Image: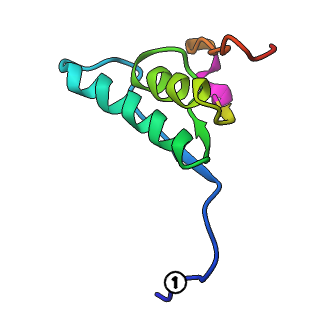
Amino acid sequence: MAAIPNKQFKNICVLSGFTYGKHKEFVEAAIDLGRSIAARKLHLVYGGGNRGLSKMVSEAAFIRGSQVLGIIPRVLKPLAVRLTHPLEKS
């Protein structure tokens, strides 16, 4: 497969757990991922929940200036709690 010259991704989708896991390293990695997304000036698309590693990635990216879009499938909406970032209007 040939590389496409002068093309850069602007959005990245991250799907991760809605729990924190058993190891604090998972939380640290999620925060680092969010920071890296923002540092690269990417926009984050994620599962939209306010729990676990998904929350950590989205908050770390948002706080550092990334646009964040949370998408919750209709079938999961009754089970999910939507995350509203502190500076985001509902």
Q: Start and end of the magenta stretch? A: 72-77
Between 45 and 62, the residue placed more toward the observer is 62
Q: Residue at x 64, y 78 (%)?
A: 6
In this rendering, position of residue 25 left or right of residue 87: left
Residue 31: give x, y in percent of width and height: 40, 28
Residue 67: give x, y in percent of width and height: 69, 35
Q: What crowding class fits label 1: few (fewer than 14 Cα within 10 Å), some (14-19), or many (20 or more)?
A: few
Q: Is residue 17 magenta?
A: no
Residue 17: give x, y in percent of width and height: 38, 27
Q: Is residue 46 above or below residue 80?
A: below
Furthest-right residue in view?
A: 89
Q: State the colouring used for the structure image.
A: rainbow
Q: Amino acid at mark 1?
A: Ala
Q: Residue at x 46, y 26 (%)?
A: 54
In this rendering, position of residue 32 left or right of residue 42: left
In this rendering, position of residue 32 left or right of residue 62: left
**Magenta stretch: helix, strand or loop mostly:** helix
Residue 41: give x, y in percent of width and height: 61, 47
- Secondary structure of the residue carrying tag 1 is loop
Q: Residue at x 30, y 26 (%)?
A: 28
Between 66 and 20, the residue placed more toward the observer is 66
Q: Is residue 74 magenta?
A: yes
**Residue highlighted by disc 1:** 3
In this rendering, position of residue 14 left or right of residue 19: right
Quarter of the rendering occupied by the C terminus:
top right
